[in-house]
Image: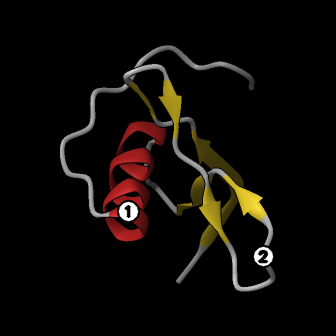
Amino acid sequence: MKIQEVSINDFLYRDEKVLFLKTLDNVWELSGGRVDYGENIEDTFQRETKEEVGFKNVTIGDLINV
């Protein structure tokens, strides 16, 4: 599988709270991952959010940092 050299982090915000995930190394981070070859950022966001936290059809807002 080809992988583009691009990754994203999901800033999941609801009810004035932000979701962070705790890694096996006890480090807190935002969910996210690499953009698959040929995949757009919106599809990556939906896929990673579903894979990592189980949320489906999340509303995507503005990009924060590029």
Number of the label disc, if any, that sits on residue 27: none
Numbered disc 1: secondary structure: helix
Spatial distance from mark 2 to mark 1, Cα to Cα?
Answer: 17 Å
Q: In which quarter of the image is the C terminus?
A: top right
Q: In this view, does 9 lie to the left or right of 45?
A: right
Q: Which of 23 and 66 is in front in this view?
A: 23
Q: Residue furthest top?
A: 62
What percent of the width, then of the height, locates residue 56? 20, 51
Foreground residue, 44 or 49?
A: 49
Q: Dot 1 corresponds to which residue?
A: 53
Kind of residue at badge 1: Val
**Other-residue count near label 1 (Cα within 10 Å), few / some / many at <14 / 14–19 / ≥20:** few
Q: Is 10 left or right of 13, judged from the image as shown?
A: right
Q: In this view, does 9 lie above or below 29?
A: above
Q: Is mark 2 on a helix, strand or loop?
A: loop
Label 2 or label 1, whichever lies nearer to me, is 2
Residue 15 in picture, x, y percent from top left: 37, 22
In this rendering, the answer to whether 52 lies above or below 12 is: below
